Image (tube, grey):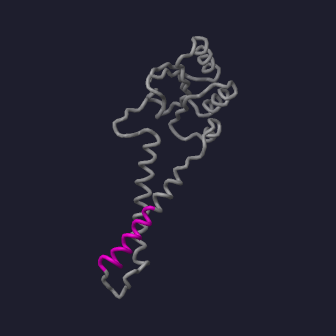
């Protein structure tokens, strides 16, 4: 979320509509938003923050294709080269018999791959402690945060004034 030992000024909002209005006002005032945290997805927030669509689905396709090739390739090798046995009247290379296992490995590789990729991208590796601004953000509060490292007291008071103008219910300063 932020660099180590960042000073953060954040405001808590009670409603997502107030948060959206505050983000629009911050963009109009040319304020650099550090982060916006919400307890649930807020429709229309991504375009306001200039966020692109996730490319995680591309990674999912690649992991799924890798699972498909692994399953199909391994079964082809086993049943045609390593242990070629005709059972049940099936030929050595029986593609319809490979479909269930190929499907299962496709789903397995995709699920594990996407999970590991997501946690890696988000910085949620084991042993990392998250930077928590306020415990209520994951419950019922909406947060708009600004970095205040190296800013003058005049700039910080301008940010506090921004929070009061946009209807923040609380404003806090925290070092994370």
- Residue 170 appears in view: no
x and y percentages locating residue 131 in the rendered image: 43, 29
- Decide if residue 7 is on the left or right side of residue 51: left
**Part of the protein shown in magenta:** 66-83
Q: Is residue 155 above or below residue 57?
A: above
In the rendered image, residue 18, in percent from the top left (x then y), is placed at: 62, 30
Q: Is residue 112 above or below residue 132?
A: below
Q: Residue at x 60, y 21 (%)?
A: 163
- Where residue 61 appears, x then y in whole percent? 51, 58
Magenta stretch, main secondary structure class: helix
Looking at this view, is 72 or 154 the one in front?
72
- Which image quarter: residue 45? top right
In magenta segment, residue 32: no
Q: Examine the structure image and report whether residue 69 is included in the region drawn in magenta.
A: yes
Does 40 sit above or below residue 85?
A: above
Residue drawn at the location 56% of the way across and 47% of the way down: 54
Q: Position of residue 29 (x, y in %)?
A: 68, 24
Classify residue 127 as left or right of residue 145.
left
Farthest residue toward the bottom?
Answer: 89
Q: Residue at x 43, y 44 (%)?
A: 119
Where residue 21 sits, quadrant-wise, is top right
**111 vs 151: above or below:** below
- Image quadrant in which you'd find residue 176: top left
Q: Nearer the viewer, residue 43 or 120?
A: 120
């Amino acid at each position: 979320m932020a660099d180590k030992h960042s000073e953060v000024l954040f405001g808590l909002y009670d409603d997502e509509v107030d948060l959206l209005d505050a983000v629009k006002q911050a963009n109009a005032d040319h304020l650099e938003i550090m982060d916006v945290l919400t307890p649930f997805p807020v429709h229309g927030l991504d375009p306001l923050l200039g966020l692109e669509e996730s490319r995680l689905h591309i990674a999912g396709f690649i992991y799924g294709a890798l699972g498909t090739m692994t399953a199909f390739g391994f079964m082809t090798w086993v049943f045609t080269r390593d242990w070629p046995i005709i059972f049940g009247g099936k030929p050595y290379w029986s593609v319809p018999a490979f479909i269930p296992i190929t499907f299962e490995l496709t789903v397995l590789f995709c699920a594990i791959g996407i999970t590991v990729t997501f946690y890696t991208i988000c910085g949620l590796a084991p042993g990392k402690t998250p930077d928590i601004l306020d415990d209520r953000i994951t419950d019922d509060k909406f947060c708009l945060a600004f970095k205040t490292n190296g800013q003058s007291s005049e700039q910080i008071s301008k940010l506090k004034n921004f929070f009061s103008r946009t209807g923040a219910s609380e404003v806090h300063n925290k070092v994370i």
